[in-house]
Image (cartoon, rainbow, N blue to C red):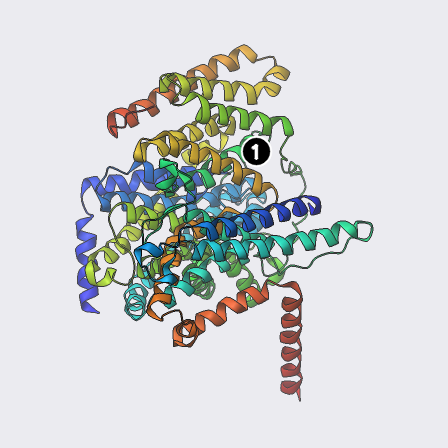
């Protein structure tokens, strides 16, 4: 996280500096004789400066943490929303099975989610493909792809695909009808 | 006083139509269903519903949004109790005791308690909404640009300080939101900022697609990137709340209601903070603090009363000052503006009836919440079994089409997608969307207030610091920043502890 903070800190610093630079370049509208305190670049410039400062602090803090990585220096932050530490979970009564651990994100799922959502909203929609078909393809592919490991393990790939196709067709038709006929939206 | 009661009566009567009641029931039920699904938040529910209700008359649309808001926060307690997964962030505190009750075979009792707490909190909040909004509106009439500038800054900084674990990251998100809100024509001279010749950017990033991206697309991507397992539900006993449970903890209900409303009013501090604060206060005051976290009825009732009381609490500053109390209230405020309502100090003068309309909408939503909470528990549980692999693609389709529906331009869809992906990435590194949203909503007001203030004072910064309310707000802003600095925070806490210790010693002596 410290390395990520370092990179993000640098990014915010550069972004803030770029905002200040762009704000400075903005027209002062002197030809219009406006009050100089109302120049359009005033507030963006101040915000850019504040962002630069925050980014620099984050960078410095993270850099100190990275340098002390052998003896990690904890940077104290004020207490999180919970004013007192969360209470320990009570021991389980006899016969109650333990809880499943919280699910962590998996890299292939992240990539697939970005690919499917980006492909649908950034590519298919508005590409000339009728919206119902685009929506059907997105919902169908998403369900099939994300259920793939479990379906393959259970030997129910075909059944899963048929179910996904039915759900996708229903969802696509409903969304299209509701927006097109009820809300009179001309879909892309 | 009586004028207010008359206006409230008129508002309530105006909603007693079949259409309004159907909207109430439908939107509250939809809200509960959305709240039941982990990963889908109240902000997402209101953002999506805003796109769906864009063509409805203002009062119908706002009624639907408020019912969805109330329903979502309430619905999240179901998942917290049965699965130990908060349906929304506001229900995280309910997990601690609600889930322990469910494991003991008292899931129904826990849900009954959550219903009672939610209804009590909501009613207390509504009472405060009806009383405090006109009063705050009257005070706000004395506000000038100076005060509004500080209020906007305070809201964004406060939200940044409290959301997440690192105030610095929260402030960065707030600044980012403020900066993004300035893209497009400025509100004073019409100058195009950061547009670079693009006609789409010249119009600015539309608020609703940006919000749908920040909360909808980002949440969908987050949930899709995690593996889903079919949950194991605990058996549900009787869901009818026991009167003894309610009467025994009336002090807790009242205290949590006050805390919920207070936190709701603070700009940018949402329902989750209200729930945790109410829970912590209840534990400190309880005769059985050791039972908290092990299935304490008092803990559950405190958490659910607090978060529901903060809903009307968050609407109070949104109506009176046009400064939202929470992220969902920010979307609600944006929806009001889209529908032609002008929240702010002039609201009580220009359309006082609307304030009472909002009170009546909250009353209807609370009644619908009670109805579904008591009579539709078991059918509602079925939604928990629907795989998220099925729900999420459909929600993303709605995010896409909803973003497009407002102005029917593809740029809004790309905005939603771009903001969603950026938020998804940032969230993974500890950056939260709530301060960004606050910044986005308040950016224009802050920009205009600072520049107008400087024009009025001819560049003199003194009025920003010497006018009484300005001075108080300035001190609070500086204190908020100072408390976000670890060294200052530690020193202040140590000082407070020392003073507390000395006071105890004096009392003992």
Give the residue at mark 1. Answer: B232
Q: Is residue B113 visible?
A: no
Q: Nearer the viewer, residue B250 or B60?
A: B60
Q: Find numbered disc 1 in the image and state the secondary structure of the residue it sits on.
A: loop
Q: Residue furthest bottom?
A: B509
Q: Chain of mark 1?
A: B
Q: Is residue B275 above or below residue A164?
A: below
Image-based side of B204 in relation to B492, left or right? left
**Residue B341 visible here:** yes
**Residue drawn 42% across and 59% down?**
B264
Residue at image point 28% right, 63% down: B345
- Against B232, residue B242 (above or below) is below
Against B197, residue B3 (above or below) is below
- Drawn side of residue B175 relative to residue B181, left or right: right
The image shows a total of numbered marks equal to 1
Give how far across and how far down residue A3 sits, in percent: 70, 44
Residue toward you, B17 or B149: B149
Q: Which image quadrant is residue B167 in?
A: bottom right
Quadrant housing the C terminus of chain B: bottom right
Residue at far top of view: A158
Name the quarter where the N terminus of chain B is drawn. Answer: bottom left
Q: Position of residue B304 (x, y in %)?
A: 46, 53
Residue furthest toward the front? A31
Residue density around tag 1, few if under 14, some if 14–19, many if 20 or more, within 10 Å: few
Residue A82 placement: quadrant = bottom right
Left of B311 or right of it: where is B11? left
Q: In which quadrant of the rendered view does residue A109 lie?
A: top right
Residue located 52% across and 68% down the image: B478
- Residue A18, position as x, y percentages in the image: 54, 47
Pick the residue in front: B48 or B188: B188
**Residue B94: where, in percent of width, then height?**
52, 50
């Amino acid at each position: 996280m410290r390395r990520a903070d370092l990179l993000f800190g640098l990014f915010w610093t550069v972004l803030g500096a770029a905002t200040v630079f762009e704000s400075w370049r903005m027209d002062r509208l002197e030809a219009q004789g406006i009050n100089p305190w109302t120049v359009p670049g005033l507030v963006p410039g101040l915000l850019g400066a504040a962002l630069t400062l925050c980014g620099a602090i984050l960078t410095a803090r993270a850099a100190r943490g990275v340098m002390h990585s052998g003896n990690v220096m904890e940077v104290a932050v004020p207490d999180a929303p919970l004013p007192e530490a969360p209470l320990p979970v009570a021991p389980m009564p006899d016969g109650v099975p333990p809880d499943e651990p919280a699910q962590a994100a998996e890299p292939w799922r992240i990539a697939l989610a970005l690919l499917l959502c980006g492909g649908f909203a950034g590519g298919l929609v508005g590409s000339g493909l009728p919206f119902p078909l685009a929506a059907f393809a997105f919902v169908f592919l998403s369900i099939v792809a994300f259920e793939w490991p479990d379906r393959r393990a259970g030997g129910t790939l075909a059944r899963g695909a048929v179910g996904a196709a039915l759900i996708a067709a229903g969802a696509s038709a409903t969304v299209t009808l509701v927006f097109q006929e009820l809300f009179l939206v001309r879909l892309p | 006083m009586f004028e207010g009661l008359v206006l409230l009566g008129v508002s309530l009567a105006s909603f007693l139509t079949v259409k309004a009641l159907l909207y109430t029931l439908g939107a509250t039920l939809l809200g509960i269903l959305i709240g039941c699904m982990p990963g889908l938040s109240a902000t997402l529910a209101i953002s999506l519903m805003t796109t769906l209700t864009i063509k409805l008359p203002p009062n119908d649309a706002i009624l639907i949004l408020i019912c969805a808001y109330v329903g979502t926060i309430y619905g999240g307690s179901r998942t917290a109790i049965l699965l130990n997964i908060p349906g929304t962030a506001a229900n995280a505190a309910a997990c601690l005791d609600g889930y322990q009750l469910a494991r003991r075979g008292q899931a129904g009792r826990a849900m009954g308690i959550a219903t009672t707490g939610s209804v009590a909190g909501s009613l207390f909040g509504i009472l405060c909404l009806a009383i405090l909004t006109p009063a705050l509106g009257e005070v706000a009439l004395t506000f000038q640009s100076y005060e509004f500038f500080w209020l906007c800054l305070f809201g964004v900084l406060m939200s940044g300080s409290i959301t997440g674990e690192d105030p610095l990251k929260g402030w960065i998100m707030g600044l980012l939101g403020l900066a993004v809100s300035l893209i497009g024509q400025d509100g004073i001279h019409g100058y195009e900022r950061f547009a670079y010749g693009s006609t789409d950017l010249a119009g600015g990033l539309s608020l609703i697609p940006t919000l749908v991206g920040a909360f909808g697309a980002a949440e969908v991507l987050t949930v899709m990137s995690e593996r889903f397992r079919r949950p194991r539900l605990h058996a549900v006993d009787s869901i009818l709340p026991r009167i003894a449970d309610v009467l025994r903890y009336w002090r807790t209900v009242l205290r949590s209601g006050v805390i919920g409303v207070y936190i709701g009013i603070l700009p940018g501090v949402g329902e989750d903070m209200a729930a945790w604060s109410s829970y912590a206060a209840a534990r400190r005051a309880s005769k059985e603090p050791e039972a908290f976290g092990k299935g304490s009825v008092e803990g559950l009732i405190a958490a659910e009363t607090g978060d529901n009381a903060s809903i009307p609490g968050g609407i109070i500053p949104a109506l009176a000052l046009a400064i939202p109390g929470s992220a969902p209230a920010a979307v609600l405020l944006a929806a009001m503006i889209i529908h032609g309502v002008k929240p702010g100090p002039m609201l009580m003068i220009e359309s006082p009836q609307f304030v009472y309309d909002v009170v009546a909408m909250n009353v209807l939503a609370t009644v619908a919440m009670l109805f579904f909470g008591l009579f539709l528990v078991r059918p509602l549980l079925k939604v928990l079994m629907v795989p998220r692999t099925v729900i999420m693609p459909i929600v993303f389709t709605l995010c896409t089409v909803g973003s497009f529906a407002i102005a029917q331009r593809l740029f809004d869809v790309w905005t939603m997608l771009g903001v969603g992906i950026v938020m998804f990435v940032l969230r993974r590194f500890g950056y939260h969307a709530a301060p960004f949203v606050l910044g986005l909503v308040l950016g224009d007001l802050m920009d205009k207030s600072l520049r107008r203030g400087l024009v009025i004072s001819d560049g003199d910064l003194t009025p920003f610091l010497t006018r009484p309310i300005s001075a108080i707000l300035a001190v609070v802003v500086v204190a908020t920043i100072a408390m976000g600095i670890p060294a200052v925070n530690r020193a202040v806490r140590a000082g407070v502890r020392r003073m507390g210790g000395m006071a105890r010693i004096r009392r003992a002596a």
